[in-house]
Image: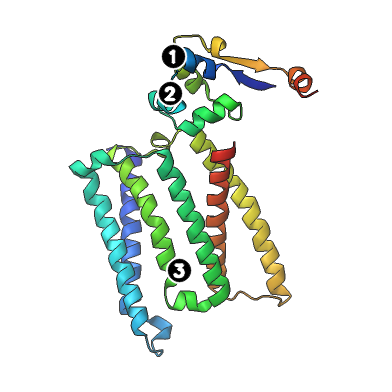
Amino acid sequence: MSEFKKWQTILKIILIVAIIGGLMISITNRGDQEEQEETVYEKIFKITAFFMVALVVIMYWVLPNTKIAEHFKMNESLFVASHILGIVCGVLGLIATLLWKQTVIEIHLFEFMVVLFGIIFVYWAMILKARKSVKISDILDEKQMDNIRSSAALSLFVVTGIMLMMYFISYHQLFVLEGKVWFLFYFFMTLLIYSCSTIYYFKKE
Amino acid sequence: MRLGNHIRRCRFDHNEMSQKELAKAIGVTRQTIFSIEKGRYAPSTLLALKLARFFGRSVEEIFYIIEDDEIKGGKE
């Protein structure tokens, strides 16, 4: 095993342990919020999210080594569908974040939107694993890679501008985003701009 | 300067092949072939060589340079 692959495997294991560990801690320990009463919905959301992530992780480890892996393939429709899902999750996430702010975090709604979007990229990872490859350029063609690079650069500039504008709006108390909500706003905004621009470049360029 | 091409003509000379069939043979998406044909996307050297090899021609027979004057002249 090459040095690069060895470190990549170690990083993957750390990431998976961190995700599962984080979710388990979240389920079993309430931390500073221990005094607050946990609602039934909250428990259901957490447990469902935990099982969804666990299922996806198991599928990633097991399925690429089975015969089903022969049917794993990347095509134009999947590429477009992945980014349309990104737009849907981005829009829903932004609406939820701006309308309900802290509630989105408290009821763990945002994790569901992230997991929903994440599942399709786990499928991308499964295709790579089935092909015993680590390079995303092995499953996408050169124009798709070019479009992803362009949209990543565009997203950086556009989202920085939007975040700066949001900072001034918040600074002048016109619309205030507090605490952790800033991250959700940043995440869903980036997801939306990135997905929109990738589809735009892919179809129009 | 822009990159022009004769891919469309080559496809028709090649048993009226569709963009989808060519894309599958070369290992790219149909959208990529469409964009190259329209001159919106300039392919890499590798992809240009793959296309040339597929059609059994040289790269220069498929791709050519359109000078700025020609583009302006075309617009006028």
- Asked if residue A158 is positioned above or below residue A2 in the image, the reply reads below
Nearer the observer: mark 2 or 3; the answer is: 2
Task: Count the numbered circles shown.
Answer: 3
- Residue at (71, 78) in percent of width and height: A173
On residue B14, which mark appears? 1
The x, y position of residue A199, in whole percent, is: 53, 45
In the image, farthest residue toward the left: A67
Judged from the image, the secondary structure of the residue bearing numbered disc 2 is helix
The structure's colour scheme is: rainbow
- Asked if residue A59 is positioned above or below residue A101 in the image, the reply reads above
Q: Is residue A65 left or right of residue B22?
A: left
Whether residue B42 is visible here, answered yes or no, is: no
Q: Which amino acid does the dot numbered 2 rest on? A: Leu
Q: Which amino acid does the dot numbered 1 rest on? A: His
Discs 3, 1: same chain? no
Whether residue A176 is visible here, answered yes or no, is: yes
- Residue at (55, 26) in percent of width and height: B36
Quarter of the rendering containing residue A73? top left
The x, y position of residue A178, in whole percent, is: 59, 76
Quarter of the rendering containing residue B72? top right
- Residue at (37, 85) in percent of width and height: A39
Q: Which amino acid does the dot numbered 3 rest on? A: Phe
Residue to which mark 3 is pinned: A110
Pointers 1 and 2 in contact (CB under 8 A)? yes
Considering the image in quadrants, where does the C terminus of chain B appear? Answer: top right
- Residue at (24, 51) in percent of width and height: A61
Nearer the observer: mark 3 or 1; the answer is: 1
Residue to which mark 2 is pinned: B22
Pointers 3 and 1 in contact (CB under 8 A)? no
